[in-house]
Amino acid sequence: MIVRILGEGQYDLSDDAVSALNDVDAKVESAIEAGDDASFHTALTTLLDGVRTAGVPHDADSLDSSDLILPMADATLGEVKDMLSDDGLIPG
Amino acid sequence: MSMWQRISLIFRSKANKALDRAEDPRETLDYSYQRQLDLLAQVRRGVADVATSRKRVELQVNQLQAQSDKLQGQAEQAIKASREDLAREALTRKSGLTTQITDLKTQQTQLQGEEEKLTLAQQRLSAKVEAFRTRKETIKATYTAAEAQTKINEAMSGIGEEMGDVGMAIQRAEDKTAQMQARAGAIDELIASGALEDASSLNQGDDIARELEAMSSQTEVEAELARLKGGSAPQAIEGGQDGGEILQAEPQAQSQAPSQSSGDSSEEQK
């Protein structure tokens, strides 16, 4: 699977690696719902580190789209909330 | 649905919206390529803008640092002259500057980070745009309009995602730079108006500098006097007549710069 970390680029991850990281993704999401800034940052950092460790950088000159997309490392909780709403941060 | 799935879906729908612009799908390729080149130019400008802001902050740090060093020097000078009050005043002003400097250095680091991020974004986008150009030519040469659609969709969604990512990076860098420029502008104004400069050399600050100067010229005069007095008696007597003018002339020459020492010279005349 191709996973993009916004602001960093794309990584290739095995399906196993992705399902292992699904739990961490769920933690990020519940932190967003709870509006819990501290655990949001901890979980996001863990998730991004997991992707960087388990993945290898995808070819720079490929035009493949990603299967999964993650916020940038320094994203705020508010930014990610905006990103998840359709007319939020992502430029159309 | 999980967070990362939701974000990727939103990206995809935005990229797809950009697809339906041209009648002949192959025209979409040219249109998109033009947008990619525009975005690339925008990233380059972004990198340049952030670099300019960073240099401006660096310059301000240097200016404030020089000011702070000057105050430190004055404090040391004041201590040597046993003027604790002056030393305290100089150090107080210096500590105000230290806060500003620490602040600016944090901004400098942040801007450096944004600059690096944008530079990397530029490199990534360049690679993709070049890949897109090659793919575009192949599609236009090989496929009929009807056949091209799938190939175009593939190429477009990949580049669309990259463009969305880079677009966000530019937006964030611009927001951060704008915030910092407002503050940098305020500090530039302070420096230009002389308010910071004044703190140690022109108006308020000059009281420290002026007093120290006055004291050192006084010390010099005392030393000169002591040297003259210490000399042989006949010389001292001769000096009493001719040397009077010398004593008078010297402090006056010095007094051209610091206006206050005219008071000193009149004291010496008595």
Image (cartoon, rainbow, N blue to C red):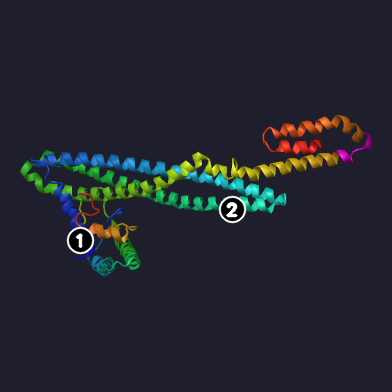
Q: Residue most toward the left?
A: B146
Per the image, is B50 magenta? no
- In this rendering, position of residue B118 left or right of residue A19: right
Q: Nearer the viewer, mark 1 or mark 2?
A: 2
Residue A2: in sight, yes or no? no
Q: Which residue is mark 2?
A: B92
Marks 1 and 2 share the same chain: yes
The kind of residue tagged 2 is Thr
Q: Which residue is mark 1?
A: B6
Q: Give the dominant element type of the magenta stretch: helix, strand or loop.
A: helix
Disc 1 on helix, strand or loop? helix
The location of residue A68, given as percent across then percent down, is: 22, 59
Looking at the image, the residue that sits furthest to the right is: B234
Name the one closer to the observer, B175 or A47. Answer: B175
Residue at 79% from the left image edge and 38% from the top image edge:
B268
Chain holding disc 1 = B
Count all numbered tags in the image, as a single digit.
2
Give neighbour class at mark 2: few <14, some 14-19, many 20+ (Cα, 10 Å): some
Label whose residue precedes the other's in the sequence (1 or 2)? 1
Are the two marked residues, 1 and 2, in contact with CB atoms closer than 8 angstroms? Answer: no
For the record, the magenta segment spans B228-234
What residue sits 73% from the left and 43% below the top? B216
> What is the number of the mark on residue B217?
none
Q: Residues within 10 Å of mark 1 (few under 14, many from 20)?
A: some
Q: CA distance from mark 1 to mark 2?
A: 54 Å
As shown in the figure, which amino acid type bears the numbered disc 1? Arg
- Residue B230: give x, y in percent of width and height: 89, 41
Residue B243, given in percent of the width and then of the height, sits at 85, 32
Quarter containing the N terminus of chain B: bottom left
Q: Is residue B229 visible?
A: yes
